[in-house]
Image (cartoon, rainbow, N blue to C red):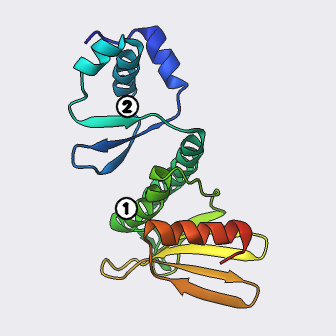
Amino acid sequence: MSEPTAATVRVIDTLPPYVGETMQGQGVLGKDTYFLARVLLRHLRSPSEAQQERPALETVHMLAPETSEALASFSRLKSALEQLLDLPESDEFGPSRPTLPSTEVAERTLFQLVQGGFSFPEAVDVGTDHDGGLRIVWENGPRFLELVVPHERDAAAYFYYSSGDQYNLQRNLGLDAVRHRFNWLDTGIG
């Protein structure tokens, strides 16, 4: 395969991030410009040339506009989580940054939405509580949704949600349950 040209790389830099999957079917969010250049070159070739060459490690899916928006939401959240991981481990009040496993749980929980092309709103707050638990908050009028990932490795993550004086917890963090909770945040139904 030929090397990407500077012009190709400039075009690629304007593309949204891609969603791919490993050979084992695990989702990945890619940021590698060189890899994107190879993918773009493959798609610019004739169909017969493109069919002869398959990526060795990853398969790239063409993105629908909804997926691009979902990726943008996820990218902003991922940046906020990375900033939290740069904080000092603790201060005079206790843990001040989440654990790496807790950020990975949050990313896995929300990335499944991206893979489904479902975008979620930008979080109004991404931080830790006094115990070092990760908390990501979304609000829409009187509706409040918070993903809580405790600092302890063996404690399960959950959603806390409320509207007015009604509140509850949701421990199911599967795709359908998470999508349902964000639909509730958006519409108040459910």
SS of the residue at dot 2? loop
Residue at 34%, 27% in the rendered image: 35
CA neighbours of label 2 inside 10 A, class few (<14), some (14 to 19), many (20+): few
Q: Using the numbered discs, state the Cα–Cα distance from disc 1 to disc 2 in whole angstroms.
A: 20 Å
Extreme-front residue of the structure: 48
Q: Residue at x 35, y 80 (%)?
A: 152
Precedes in sequence: disc 1 or disc 2: 2
Q: At numbered mark 1, what does the secondary structure look like: helix, strand or loop? A: helix
Residue 60 x %, y %: 37, 35
The N terminus, quarter of image: top left
Q: How far across and how far down the image is residue 62, in percent? A: 46, 34
Q: Is residue 109 above or below residue 71?
A: below
Nearest the eye: 145 or 86: 145
The residue nearer to you, when weighing 168 against 153, is 168
Residue 160 percent coordinates (x, y): 57, 81
When the figure is inspected, residue 59 is found, relative to residue 88, above or below; the finding is above
Relative to 159, say whether 78 is above or below. above
Q: Badge 1: how crowded within 10 Å, few (<14), some, or many (20+)?
A: some
Residue drawn at (70%, 65%), measured in percent from left and top? 186
Q: Residue at (44%, 78%) from the top-left corner?
A: 172
Mark 2 residue type: Asp
Relative to 58, 61 lies left or right? right
- Asked whether 88 or 37 is in front, the reply is 37
The amino acid type found where label 1 is placed reads Glu
Q: Nearer the viewer, residue 132 or 32?
A: 32
Which image quarter is the C terminus in? bottom right
Where residue 104 is drawn, which disc sits there? 1
Task: Residue 140 in the image: state x and y as whole percent.
Answer: 74, 68
**Number of residue marks:** 2
Residue 28 got which mark?
none
Q: From the viewer's perspective, is 170 left or right of 122?
A: left
Residue behind mark 2:
32
